[in-house]
Amino acid sequence: MSSFESRSDARRKARLAEYAHGMRHSETESERIVWAAIRAGATGVQFRRQVPIAGLFIGDFVASEVKLVVEVDGPWHARRGTPDARRDVKLRRMGFTVLRLPVSLVERQLPVALQRIREAIAMLSATEGP
């Protein structure tokens, strides 16, 4: 890798980190709901919010311990299908599991949304082995 590529990569990662920081301070109502539940211990693992991943993506909620990315998707994501699908493929190649929760589920049935997160964590924890 040339020094130009590494400088360019470093700038991209810095911009992404700055953007993620801004996103943490302008979260949606549904993201606030999920974050409050996670912080209250509803999932049993530690999550971080609006996390840059590999300098390429920002995950809404990331549990590094089990490599789980939880995305809270509003109606606009239905129209973005292809970019989201490509992103999910790249994240899976990096070893992450992506769980997409619709805003409507989070806002109307939070216990069900949290159960889906816990089920994903349990599945990922079971596959880790000793």
Image (cartoon, rainbow, N blue to C red):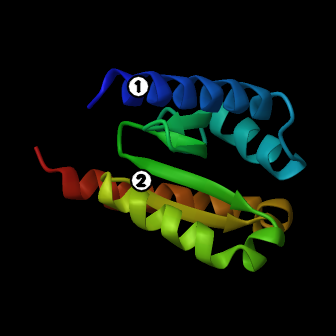
Q: Is residue 26 left or right of residue 68?
A: right
Q: Is residue 98 left or right of residue 17?
A: left
The amino acid type found where label 2 is placed reads Ile
Residue at image location 81% in from the left, 41% down from the top: 32
Q: Residue 88 appears at what percent x and percent y?
A: 48, 64
In the rendering, which numbered label is found on residue 4? 1
Q: Residue furthest left?
A: 130
Q: Nearer the viewer, residue 13 or 1?
A: 1
Q: Nearer the viewer, residue 48 or 114?
A: 48
Q: Quadrant of residue 85?
A: bottom right
**Could one spot residue 108 in this view of the protein?**
yes
Pointer 1 or 2: first along the chain: 1
Classed neighbour count for the residue bearing mark 2: other residues with Cα under 10 Å, few (<14), some (14–19), many (≥20) = many
Q: Total of numbered circles in the picture?
A: 2
Q: Quadrant of residue 81?
A: bottom right
Q: Secondary structure at mark 1?
A: helix
Q: Residue 90 appears at what percent x and percent y?
A: 40, 60
The amino acid type found where label 1 is placed reads Phe
Q: Nearer the viewer, residue 10 or 77?
A: 10
Query: Does residue 32 sit above or below 116 in this rendering?
Result: above
Residue at image location 83% in from the left, 28% down from the top: 25
Q: Secondary structure at mark 2?
A: helix
Residue at image location 45% in from the left, 21% down from the top: 7
**Could one spot residue 112 in this view of the protein?**
no
Question: Mark 1 and mark 2: span between their CA atoms?
Answer: 40 Å
Residue at image location 26% in from the left, 31% down from the top: 1
Q: Residue 94 appears at what percent x and percent y?
A: 32, 51
Q: Nearer the viewer, residue 22 or 10?
A: 10
Q: Residue 108 appears at what percent x and percent y?
A: 85, 67
The C terminus - image quarter: top left
Q: Which residue is mark 2?
A: 121
